[in-house]
Image (cartoon, grey):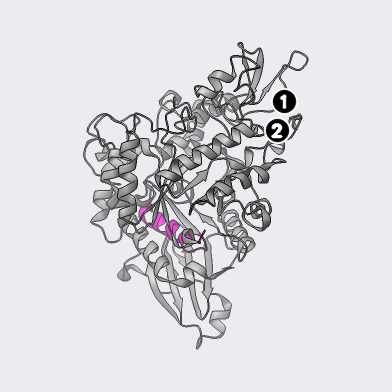
Amino acid sequence: MNDWYKKMAFYQIWIRSFKDGNEDGIGDLYGVYDKLEYIKSLGVDGIWFSPLYPSPNADYGYDIADYKDIHKDYGDLGQFKKVLAKAHDLGLKVIMDLVVNHTSDEHPWFLESKKSKDNPYSDYYIWRDAKKGKLPNNWESLFEGKAWEYCHERDQYYLHIFAKKQPDLNMDNPKVREEVKSIMRFWLDMGVDGFREDVINFISKKEGLPNGLPFIPMANGMPYYKDGPHIHDYLAEFREVASEYDCFLLGEGPMTTTKSALKYMTGHHKNLDMMFNFDHMMADCFMTEYIHRPFDLRRLKKAFSKWQYELNGKAWNTLYLENHDHPRIISRYGDEKHFHRESGTMLAASYIFQQGTPFIYQGQEIGMTNIHLRDIEQYVDVSSKTNFYRFHTDEPLSKRMARIYHSSRDSSRTPMQWNGEKYAGFSGAKPWFYVNSNYKKINVETEEKDPYSILNFYRKCLKLRKDNDVFLWGSYKEYFKGHPFLYVYERAYKDKRMLVVCSFADRPLALRIPREYEKDKSRCRLRLILDNYPREDRLKGLLKPYEVRIYEIL
């Protein structure tokens, strides 16, 4: 396989909220088909689809009931093929979500497996007897209570690391791995270009399933299912299938470190091309968005730089600030109230110009923000509801709802805001979920007309990255590590250097240039090539609130 993915930028589509093309209030492949030119206009080169498969939607697509079909809400295989063909005609690669740590409990495999202990599917999942009248072990799920659910038909418990309706597959069973390979071939034969492998570092569990340490909330047991004993053997089997095609493999690795990630992407274990990590998403929380703490730029910079330095020359970084699993970034790391445009554009530049392949999540490019809902019952995300009630029932209601506002994945799943018309132009019918009330101000149509909009700034950033080898291949160097409001880094390649200066302050800030530049001004002249403020608004020697400047070093 070649390294085409390194030059690319991807756009993630969470289809249920992207665009409704058949006027039933639910986003679908008809809407995607109509918006492919828009996606191409951003300057991206590929699409990552979150799950499109049939699902009862206990976890909105990540509980799959059939891996080889399209959910009826979104269209059918014929429409998917039309989207795939048009995307390819436009020069866009298409990757699918491969969710094989678990299925839906309504998948035919599970329906058969739970019938008895001696049918062909009985060992497709992880079943255990009660232990002395108690659960098989003390593991907790990440979404919904204990990690075991009792099944009357088998008089046994099945393991679910996530929701109760998401039983974990038994990847130790060779038949299950053959099923995964068959799924891969089905979509690759159709013309799909690769896969994003969901929580892929969880698929191998430690033999014996030992008890975990009881003081780790939600994650109790994780040391025994993260980076498990046979993970690299199993991924090698999947990589062998991918090698039959020009197939790109991207893994999601919750709680992964640079050390463990490199094992997946280098050496004889090189079974993934890239890996999503979560370190930089912890700058305003601890372990999970539900344990909130004030945003600290130094935590963010430390995470960014760690992955830049430690993967340099060894593996390729995956760059992102938003996806379907996290609240909106301007509401977290920016200022949605007073400096929406400024912080949204600065955040774009802060990550797009690092070394790696950028991913942009639908709505991120126009600066969509978290939604404020009044009542927990208005939310639909399983992790929001269960985490909300399990861990914070002792808090006042106002504080609990503020936690959900800051933390819920539902904030990234509100309908895409296309224009200022009813339902934000997402649909002519009432949408399946609430539209953010700020849609009349924040929408694609409005931002298309404004040369300084967040939307047009994303386009400028992606074009600048693509047109300059220094941003594609250059080394990375951070300056002013301890500064609480400035993020400054250099990219250098051959005889070219670029400097990215980002202010995370809500007030004017002194512009600081690396000392080595100041010492040798004859060799370090700065030419401004991109800014998120109009020329007439710039301040000499100062950065305006949330200003970003990109300099070429002459």
Circle 2 crowding by C-alpha within 10 Å: few under 14, some 14–19, many from 20: many
Circles 1 and 2: CB atoms closer than 8 Å: yes
- Most foreground residue, 156 or 361: 156
Residue sitting at x 41%, y 66%:
466
> Is 313 part of what is drawn in magenta?
no
Badge 2 amino acid: Gly
In the image as oriented, which residue stretches furthest toward the right? 132
Q: Is residue 532 visible?
A: no
Relative depth, front residue between 114 and 495: 114
Looking at this view, is 307 or 96 the one in front? 96
- Whole-percent x, y for residue 158 in the image: 63, 22
Q: Which comes sooner in the sequence, label 1 or label 2?
A: 1
Q: Which residue is mark 1?
A: 138
Q: Which residues are magenta?
A: 334-356
Q: Residue 54 falls in which quadrant of the image? A: top left
| Secondary element at image label 2 | loop
Rendered image: mark on residue 218: none
Q: Is residue 82 above or below residue 528?
A: above
How far apart in space, not on screen, are marks 1 and 2 (Cα)?
Answer: 7 Å
Q: Which mark is residue 221?
A: 2
